[in-house]
Amino acid sequence: MKMRNAEGFTLIELIIVVALIGILAAFSLPYYRGWQQNARYRESARKIASILRDARARTIAQNVEHRVSFSISGSSYTMERGTGAFYSGSWPTIEGPVYLSSDGITLKSGASCNSDIDMTISFNPNGTSGFSGAGYVCIMDSSSPPVRKFRIGAVDNTTGRVTISN
């Protein structure tokens, strides 16, 4: 009897390939989880920088003060519009509260990222920051003690420029 040309894979070959894929997946899973958590930190930092830049742009365009208020304990922020160009008496909320992803992310305030006090960063119609000194909000992990991942804020109150740093 003539042997036919065998095409395809044997069961042993398939089992070896599936086992190799399983081993590679097991080694890469911790790296993937770390990458995923870092992506959450970056997303939160970009959200905060974006809302600060938006508040500054609206202030310049509308010639009316705007500010972003951060609730450190609530991991949230709101954008508020003043009633005048300077020294506004009331601040109605125009956006928010917006909650950051709470999965392993906490907020701190201050230049050294060690304060739990709520803070507000305001912008004047000429584009400057109304915060005296540098106003920072920090994205921290939930370890004990917390480790700073990103620091976002108006670096210089004379320019109102918003930056993100590690």
Image (cartoon, grey):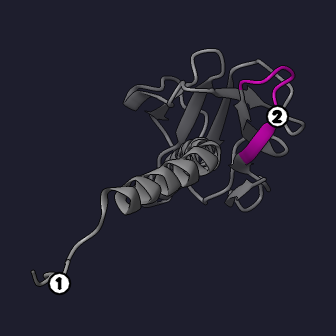
Tell me residue 17's x, y (percent).
Answer: 43, 60
Q: Name the outermost residue toward the front.
A: 1
From this view, report whether residue 89 is shown above or below residue 46. above
Tell me residue 38's x, y (percent).
Answer: 63, 47
Observer-nearest of 32 and 66: 32
- Residue at point 90%, 36% (across, down): 112
- Residue at point 77%, 30% (across, down): 109
Characterize the magenta stretch by its predominant secondary structure: loop
Q: Is residue 59 visible?
A: no
Crowd rating for badge 2 (residues with CA inside 10 Å; few <14, some 14–19, many 20+) = some
Residue 5, disc: 1
The residue tagged 2 is: 147
What amino acid is labelled 2 in the image? Val
| Dot 2 or dot 1, earlier in sequence | 1
From this view, report whether residue 59 is shown above or below residue 75. below
Q: Mark 2 or mark 1: which is in front?
A: 1
Query: What range is drawn magenta here?
Result: 142-151
Residue 143 in magenta?
yes
Q: Name the outermost residue toward the left.
A: 1
Q: SS of the residue at dot 2?
A: loop
**Quadrant of residue 118 within the rendered picture:** top right
What amino acid is labelled 1 in the image? Asn
**Quadrant of residue 111 within the rendered picture:** top right
Residue 130, disc: none
Left or right placement of residue 26 versus residue 153 in this view: left
Q: Quadrant of the N terminus?
A: bottom left
Q: SS of the residue at dot 1?
A: loop
Tell me residue 144's x, y (percent).
Answer: 83, 20
**Quadrant of residue 138 within the rendered picture:** top right
Q: Is residue 17 visible?
A: yes
Observer-nearest of 49 and 147: 147
Tell me residue 7's x, y (percent).
Answer: 19, 78
